[in-house]
Amino acid sequence: MAAYVTQNRVEMFSRPNDKFPNWESQEVSTGTTIMAVEFDDGVVIGADSRTTTGAYIANRVTDKLTPIHDRIFCCRSGSAADTQAVADAVSYQLGFHSIELDEPPLVQTAANLFKQMCYRYREELMAGIIVAGWDKRRGGQVYTVPMGGMLVRQPVSVGGSGSSYIYGFIDSNYRSGMSKEECLRFTAEALALAMERDGSSGGVARLAAITEAGLERTVILGNQLPTFFSA
Amino acid sequence: MNEATQYKLKLERLGYHQFRTMERHPTNYLCKGVSTGTTILAVKFNGGVIIGSDSRASVGGSYVSSKVINKLIQIHDKIFCCIAGSLADAQAVTKMAKFQLSFHSIQMDSPPLVKAAASVLKELCYSNREDLEAGFITAGWDKKRGPQVYTVSMGGMLLSQPFTIGGSGSTYIYGYVDAKYKPDMSREECLQFATNALALAIGRDNVSGGVAHLVVITEGGVEHVVVPGEKLPKFHDE
């Protein structure tokens, strides 16, 4: 998902309105970086942890990886309120569907539920979501539902404002057939690079690996993130 | 009046006042804010610098007005610059800078410093900041400090960096260049780094494309390398 192109082309060390920030009137947004990668036995998902209202960081330890079902997660970007509301609605619908079926739901079903909601209410919502998980039929899958309500399956998907900065890194470093550890390292490095460059992404990096066996969540604190050359 | 003039006037009425330029990212071509439709970079290596760009000029993000323009401008023997922003502004500024630099070099009776070239551009950009919309990457070699890379942003800030990227395509490769750059690379490593970065940006940005123009500047001289589209490196999904 590409970042909005800003009108302001001049670098500033600080702005006049930094003295009196007007963050009460700004919407809470997860200007963010989210990412999901498929591997043979499952998926690895990751996100930063910053929620902003304008220039104020409302929550610096946000959890943007939301469980929708036992083995299905979604990564949220865009308006925090919109994505929380949609995720709640979809997890209710999916739970009900799973009880009717009497078996775990498919990731594709969850993705389609997100798509239907995001497409129907596209004018009102500002939500970019990546749905990722494991099911018995197709193994690990990543589906992306960007703003507007498109649905497409991809082996690797990034989203949020920080994602623009790492397209080149993802294109050059992703290979199919990576192991879980390689995927975790790839995701951590990509998130670290995006958090370095995007002002709306930062904090800690949250990762989760979803496989048939279950779920493993890790947190990488700010000072433990991979470092790179700084010009 | 003919069709072309009518179309131009219509665009001007809509506020789209820059025509025949390299910018206007498609998402905001009707707005005043300009995002530069290009990818440019300059990288220092052991013994020289490489300055590079794509070769696409587009109008409104939907028509490619030129597939093979050279955005690398030689403002002195061993100093090149590449432009981000309005093509008209850039041409005017570089013409001025070229003249001022050659005059300065005659007065000093020696080739100008890269920092002097960057300063000249900065003065022009800063003094005329209200009217201009052009930023520059200047790179070159001089005897005093060897290879150098400077960036002059649109408002007129001057900064020296080991490497720098610019243009609309540059947003997609920040992660890649941050991860892959190493100081003191060899010439071949640096060429590969710059070509890869351009190829990745061209792959994701629709207003960057064409061939990759690269200029290698060392104490020995200046070498122009052109990598045509089909010879650019391909990545996993292509």
Image (cartoon, coloured by chain):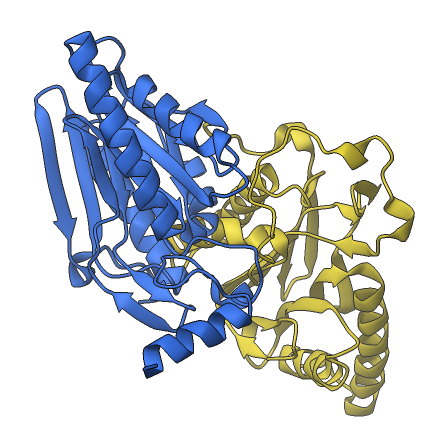
Chain colours: A yellow, B blue
Residue B12 image point, x, y percent: 49, 68
Position of residue A190 measured from the top left corner of the image (x, y, whole percent): 52, 46
User: Residue A129's spot in the image, x, y percent?
Assistant: 67, 67
Percent coordinates x, y for residue A175 in the rendering: 38, 57
Query: In terms of image quadrants, where is residue A89?
Result: bottom right
Between residue A37 and residue B2, name the one nearer to us: B2
Q: Residue, x 39% and y 34% (percent of image)?
A: B164
- Name which quarter of the figure residue A34 lies in: bottom right
Position of A15 with respect to B101 (left or right) is: right
Nearest the camera: B31 or A174? Answer: B31
Residue B106, relative to residue A6: is it above or below? above
- Residue toward you, A61 or B221: B221
Work out which quarter of the rendered image holds the N terminus of chain B and state it.
Answer: bottom left
Asked whether A141 or A25 is in front, the reply is: A25
Residue at horizontal 84%, vertical 56%? A27
Q: Is residue A224 above or below residue B194?
A: above
Query: Which residue is at a point 40% across and 56% down the rendered structure image?
Result: A171
Q: Residue extending furthest left?
A: B220
User: Which residue extends farthest front?
Assistant: B1
| Quadrant of the snapshot with the C terminus of chain B | bottom left
* Left or right of residue A9: residue B163: left
Q: In the picture provided, is A146 more to the left or to the right than A173?
A: right
Evaluate whether residue A71 shows in this view. Answer: no
Q: Is residue B209 visible?
A: yes
Q: Residue at x 43, y 37 (%)?
A: B179
Quarter holding residue A133 = bottom right
